[in-house]
Image (tube, rainbow, N blue to C red):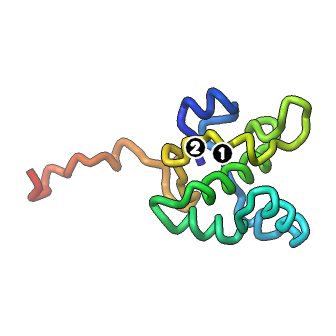
Amino acid sequence: MSMCEADRSDLGGPEWLRLDTDRVLDTPGGTLIRWEAETRYPVERALGDALSSNHPPAAAVLVLLWLARKQGGVDAGGQDDDGRPESYTRLAQVKTLRTRIRSAREPEPTVEDDAVPPETSPAP
């Protein structure tokens, strides 16, 4: 996941955050219920909504971004200045339509993957 430059500047953290979905799936029910109470959005639904759509709902993006920042800890900006875990409401101003989500299964884009057709292509 990657927030836009303005959001990264405001909230801190690296350009790309990794959300370990297996780690989320292994989270005990009591913890998931607590997170869902804080976010007011089911974590399972957030995973499905955000990872299966090119235009996921804002709430799903924020939930997954919050979880990715939690997993990344201090290095991902996932803690408040007092060292406590970052509150979900701190992300309320994130421009979710500018947040990029890329599956780890997708290869990194390369120069060779650019839109230039090969010389033998019938395309102009």
- Amino acid type indicated by mark 1: Leu
Relative vertical location of residue 10 with respect to residue 91 in this rendering, above or below = above
Q: Residue at x 65, y 28 (%)?
A: 10
Q: Give yes or no for contact between labels 1 and 2 (Cβ–Cβ under 8 Å).
A: yes
Give residue 1's position: percent from left, percent from top.
60, 48
Q: What element carries label 1?
A: loop
Q: Residue at x 80, y 56 (%)?
A: 38
Q: In front here: 86 or 27?
A: 86
In this figure, which residue is indicated by the disc labeled 1? 17
Q: In front here: 52 or 87?
A: 87
Q: Residue at x 55, y 42 (%)?
A: 95
- Amino acid type indicated by mark 2: Ser
Q: Is mark 2 on a helix, strand or loop?
A: loop
Q: Residue at x 87, y 72 (%)?
A: 29
Mark 1 / mark 2, whichever is N-terminal: 2
Q: In front here: 33 or 103?
A: 33
Relative vertical location of residue 71 with respect to residue 84 in this rendering, above or below = below
How packed mark 2 is, by other alpha carbons closer than 10 Å (few <14, some 14-19, many 20 or more), is: some
Tell me how far mark 1 sits from mark 2, CA to CA. Answer: 6 Å
In this figure, which residue is indicated by the disc labeled 2? 2
Give residue 76's position: percent from left, percent from top.
74, 39
Q: Quadrant of residue 90?
A: top right
Give residue 92's position: percent from left, percent from top.
66, 43
Left or right: residue 31 versus residue 61 is right
